[in-house]
Image (cartoon, rainbow, N blue to C red):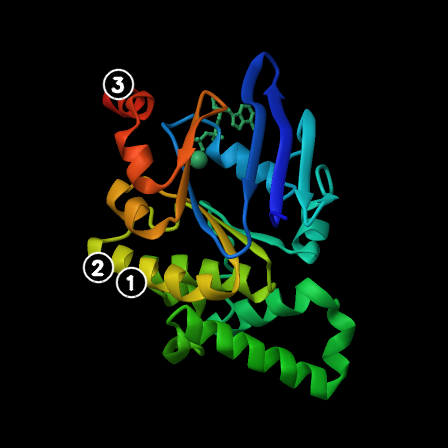
Amino acid sequence: MPVLRTQGLTVRFGGLTALNNVNFEVASGEIRAIIGPNGAGKSTFFNCLTGVIRPTAGRVLLNGEDVAGLPSNRISQKGIARSYQITNILPNATTLENVRIAAQSRRHGWSMLRHHANFRDILDKAEAVLHAVGLGSKAEELAANLSHGDQRNLEIGIALATQPQVLCLDEPTAGMSAAETHETMELVRRIAKNLTILIVEHDMQVVMELASRITVLHYGEVLAEGAPAEIQDNPKVQEVYLKT
Ligand SMILES: Nc1ncnc2c1ncn2[C@@H]1O[C@H](COP(=O)(O)OP(=O)(O)O)[C@@H](O)[C@H]1O
Ligand SMILES: [Mg+2]
């Protein structure tokens, strides 16, 4: 059974159909890239999966359970997390605190802070996450003082700290240098061992190297889906990308 599946997912904003009857499924452990021109509906798709917006129609099945329309905190607790294109970081908290708060919020609410053993447990998890995203040595830095690239990686850490089954990354390398992009791709590969990743990414080379399969959205519909080589050779896909 796929870990995540959508059936007939449709989003209309007034007269504009941003997603039209999207049927999608991803297997557990996969790294799936979602590509498509600007305005294709990629962010809207993630917004539906993570409860930021309620779809006009259709279902979002996480392990067979329909989570469409649930508020984002409930969906996060059920196991779908995302990092935002717009930053989600608390700038005046340290790097470690940012991740710890996310780990905390996921499961139990603030009352757990009273229990020392559990607090230690959460702190250990937060530290492990920081190491996974390459920020172990910057735990005590204020998040505001991190470089842009480190802040983007911290966003991934914040999402990861909620212990998701499915992690949605919306253009995680936006604004990064080539070296930072490379590091972030290594990071994604590292963390992918234990979860399913959906990634929107513009850099084709990055997508081809990282993803096991690619889904192409165009005008809110699935234009093509397949292994990277198939997508690269697909005439419909080539046409869309030559036009933009
Ligand atoms: N909240 C919104 N209200 C109205 N229109 C929106 C909203 N969000 C996205 N859209 C429109 O939906 C379409 C898909 O947008 P989006 O999902 O952001 O595309 P992508 O991420 O692929 O660039 C675009 O035409 C965009 O202008
Ligand atoms: Mg977008």
Q: Quadrant of residue 76?
A: bottom right
Q: Give the residue type at disc 3.
A: Lys
Q: Is residue 162 left or right of residue 240?
A: right
Q: Which residue is mark 2?
A: 179
Q: Which residue is mark 3?
A: 243
Q: CA distance from mark 1 to mark 3?
A: 31 Å
Cβ–Cβ below 8 Å for labels 3 and 2?
no
**Quadrant assignment for ligand 2:** top left
Q: In this rendering, does residue 216 appear at all?
A: no
The image shows residue 82 at horizontal and vertical percentages of 54, 51
Identify the mark nearer the N-term, 3 or 2.
Answer: 2
Q: Give the residue type at disc 2.
A: Ala
Q: Residues within 10 Å of mark 1 (few under 14, many from 20)?
A: some
Residue at image x 75%, y 76%?
112
Q: Which residue is mark 1?
A: 183
Work out whether residue 225 or residue 17 is closer to the camera in this orientation and state it. Answer: 225
Work out whether residue 90 or residue 21 is closer to the camera in this orientation and state it. Answer: 21
Task: Label 2: state its secondary structure.
Answer: helix
Ligand 2 within 8 Å of the CB at mark 2:
no
- Per the rendering, the mark at residue 154 is none
Q: Considering only vertical position in the picture, is 34 above or below 73?
A: above
Q: Give the residue type at disc 1.
A: Glu
The image shows residue 142 at horizontal and vertical percentages of 44, 70
Cβ–Cβ below 8 Å for labels 1 and 2?
yes
Task: Label 3: state its secondary structure.
Answer: helix
